[in-house]
Image: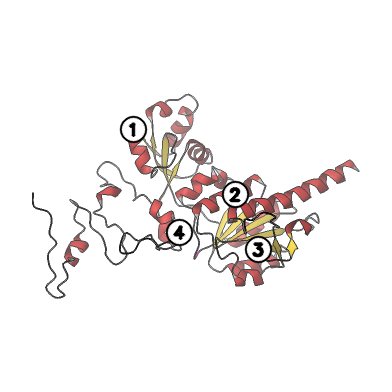
Amino acid sequence: MEGFKPRRDDSTGDRRSSNNVERGRSDRPSYNRDDRQPSSGDRRFGDNRNDSFSKPKEWRDRPANNRHNRGGWQDPPAPEIAEEEVTDYLYGKHSVFTAIEKERQINRIWVLSKLRHHPAFFTLIDQAKANGTVVDEVDVQRLGYLANGGNHQGIVAQVAPHDYLEIEELISRALATSDHPIIVVADGIVDPQNLGSILRTAEAMGVQGVIIPQRRAVGITSTVLKVAAGALEHIPVARVVNLSRALGQLKEAGFWIYGTTADAEQAIYTVDFTDRRPVVLAIGGEGDGLSLLTQKGCDHLVSIPLTGKTPSLNAANAAAMCLYEISRQRLSNMLRLSER
């Protein structure tokens, strides 16, 4: 069979047919040569003949790094646009069942038959079905495809976009929930694994909320949901257009803002967090750390002293160490007060 030969564009002499790109042929892959993103005709992303779901978005979750892609497939730009969260996938038993328990809007569930009828999960899946979720029993290959090769543990769910809070509501909730609340500001985190880990740690350490910027940072994607392991069902997240303005609002509400930088002279363990005042911990993104504007909005800059040869920690590890130090001091102070 003779191979496909793209029609020559007589006006430019270029053999890449613009007509073929626009049509998105369904019988063979076609690409937009301008941005290197697959068109609707790329069969690797499914033809939607059996069910309705959006294209897998693993390629959207990766931060841009095109150093080794000269002339080949281009990684997408760092996630900074709202289109990434039109519809997303949640996979893994703990993540999906926590979402069902919290009555999050779930459009569809794909599940292995043995898990669907397992006594421990049957009632939860029926609960989702009663709330209008479509439940399909599929094979393990189908689940692997939907989860982009992730550890799905026999179940994948198509969820509605994450419901972000407004900054004002997050602040008011935090102050109403605790006398000495903690809010984490994640500045420029582009790796969904890091953001998911930060959210998981924050919820585990009793943080009242997390704030992320809308631009030049990853939002709540399927990878973030998976890594967070159900934490997002318990901790509110606000997404703001102007992070500097958000820091100003936090100050007006009585929060003291501590930013982490590698070259800060004050070590995190020398700060007194036992005075029960509201605290904001600002964590910088991978590579660049806190932006200069964010640093200017902080009341204090602190560092984590390192004694090994490794020059720095990633964002998730730094957040975990700082949040533990804040919680350790406050818990120790409470124990001392109770012993008096």
**Which residue lies under the disc numbered 1?**
139
Gap in angstroms between the C-alphas marked 4 and 2: 25 Å
Residue at the outermost bottom position: 11
Residue at the outermost top position: 119
Comparing labels 2 and 3, the label whose residue is closer to the camera: 3
Residue at the image point whose x is 83% and y is 43% from the top: 335
Residue at the outermost right position: 340
Task: State yes or no: discs 3 and 1 in contact (Cβ < 8 Å).
Answer: no
Residue at the image point whose x is 38% and y is 28% from the top: 113
Mark 3 residue type: Ala
Secondary structure at badge 1 equals loop
Tell me which label, 4 or 3, sits earlier in the chain: 4
**Which residue lies under the disc numbered 3?**
262
**Which residue lies under the disc numbered 4?**
63
Query: Against 67, is 122 above or below?
Result: above
Tell me which label, 3 or 1, sits earlier in the chain: 1
Task: State yes or no: discs 4 and 2 in contact (Cβ < 8 Å).
Answer: no
How crowded is the residue under tag 2: few (<14 C-alpha within 10 Å), some, or many (20+)? some
Tell me which label, 2 or 3, sits earlier in the chain: 2
Instruction: Please give the range of residues in magenta.
Output: 214-218
Mark 4 residue type: Pro
Residue 235: mark in rendering: 2
**Picture coordinates of residue 260 (x, y %)?**
66, 62
Residue 238 location, quadrant: bottom right
Mark 2 residue type: Ile
- Please tell me whether residue 139 belongs to the stretch shown in magenta: no
